[in-house]
Amino acid sequence: GLALATKSASISKDMPRLVIVVMKDKSSLYSNVKRYEESTGVVTQVILSKHFKKPNEQLFVNIGLKINKKLGGNNCSLSDRQQISFISSAPVRILFKLWTI
């Protein structure tokens, strides 16, 4: 699979920027996919096939956000400083973490 695709791409000098892999479960193949990503620099996204049985819009939005970030995109940014001056007149970095239970 991935080895053949890499060989074919290297011959044509046209490496993909993204490889999406659909798996039944997160088996030992998952580590092979991530090793492929590390060795080639090609971004990978693994999606479990069970998610296609009951499509969920939010899941695919989240996958899109992950892919965008992996490809160097920016998923969010703050507005112009003047519009958020109620926080501080100096530059501010806001960090947060979401926990799911």
Image (tube, rainbow, N blue to C red):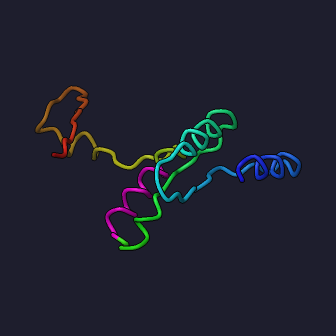
Image coordinates of residue 88 in percent, x first then y, are: 15, 30
Q: Quadrant of residue 32?
A: top right
Q: Is residue 30 above or below residue 88?
A: below
Residue closest to the eye, 19 or 73 = 19
Please provide the residue range marked out in magenta.
56-68
Q: Is residue 56 above or below residue 99?
A: below
Residue closest to the eye, 25 or 81 = 25
Q: Indicate left or right for 35 with 82 as reference.
A: right
The residue at the far top in this view is: 90
Query: In the image, what residue occupies the spot 75% across and 46% down?
Result: 3
Q: Quadrant of residue 64?
A: bottom left
Image coordinates of residue 38 in percent, x first then y, are: 62, 33
Query: In the image, what residue occupies the spot 15% across and 46% down?
Result: 101
Q: Indicate left or right for 15 with 59 as reference.
A: right
The residue at the far bottom in this view is: 54
Q: Quadrant of residue 61?
A: bottom left
Judge whether residue 3 is colored magenta: no
